[in-house]
Image (tube, helix red, strand yellow):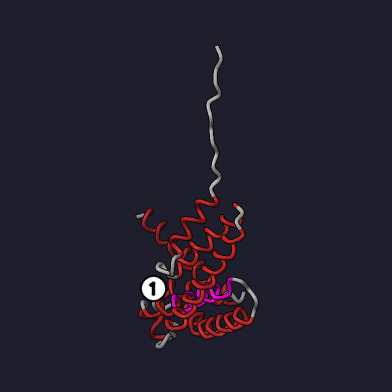
Amino acid sequence: MQRTRLYFILLLAILTVSCSTGKKALQKGDYADAIFKSIERLKSNPDSKNASETLRNGYPLAIQTLEIEIEEILASNSSNKYGEVALKYELLNDMGKNIRRTPAALKIIPNPKTYNSQLTASKDKAAEEAYQNGVNLLDKGSRLESKEAYFAFQSCLDFNPNYKDARKLLVRAKEDATLKVVVEQLPVSG
C-alpha cells in the first residue's frame, strides 16, 4: 500500500514537471519542443488543460517560426541549405504525425499541416547538393578532402539511397581517405 502510494506521488510529480516544461518551452520560444511535450502529456492525460493550451497556442507559432526559418535558409548561401530545409520539413511533418496519432491533440488541432511534397523536393535537392559537394571534395585529391567527401556522399545517400553513383563514390572516398600503413619485417642478421 505504501509503495503504491509512493509510485503514485512520483508519477504525479513527473507529470507535473512534464507539463510545466512544455509550457516553459513555449514561453522560451522553443515551440517545437513545447508541441512534442504537450502531445506526450495529452497521451497520458487527455484532459490536461495546460497541455491543451500549450498545443493550441504553440502549434501555429511552431508552424510560422519553422516556415520563416526555411525561407531564411533558402535565401542564404549555405552549402548545405537544402539539407537544413529537409530537416525542418521533417520536423513539421513529425509534429503533424504526432498530433494525428493522439486523439486528444487531434481534437485541438483537427487538421495538422503536412509538408510531404516540400519534403520530397528538398530531399532531392539536398541529395544533389551533398553529391556535388562530395564530387568537388574528391576532385581535390587529398586524404582530408576525401574524408569529408565520404561524409558528403553518406549524407547524399541518407537523402536518397539510390542517388546516381554516390554509393560507388562513397567507396572510393573511403579508400582514398584511409591511411595505409605498410609494415615490413627487418632482416635479422645473425
Amino acid type at circle 1 is: Lys
Q: Nearer the viewer, residue 166 or 93?
A: 166
Q: Nearer the viewer, residue 155 or 128?
A: 128
In the image, taking residue 61 as reference, residue 162 lies left or right, namely left
Q: Quadrant of the N terminus?
A: bottom left
In the image, taking residue 62 as reference, residue 76 lies left or right, namely right
- Residue 182 placement (x, y as % from top left): 54, 36
Q: How many marks?
A: 1
- Residue 83 placement (x, y as % from top left): 53, 72
Q: Is residue 4 magenta?
A: no
Q: Write the residue at 44% across / 85% down.
A: 113
Q: Quadrant of the C terminus?
A: top right
- Residue 15 placement (x, y as % from top left): 46, 67
The residue range painted magenta reads: 80-94
Direction bottom: furthest residue = 111
Look at the image and tell me whether residue 148 can be seen.
yes
Q: Is residue 83 magenta?
A: yes
Q: Main secondary structure of the magenta part?
A: helix
| SS for callout 1 | helix
Q: Nearer the viewer, residue 105 or 61?
A: 61
How packed mark 1 is, by other alpha carbons closer than 10 Å (few <14, some 14-19, many 20 or more), is some
Residue under circle 1? Answer: 43
Q: Work out whether 79 lies above or below 118.
A: above
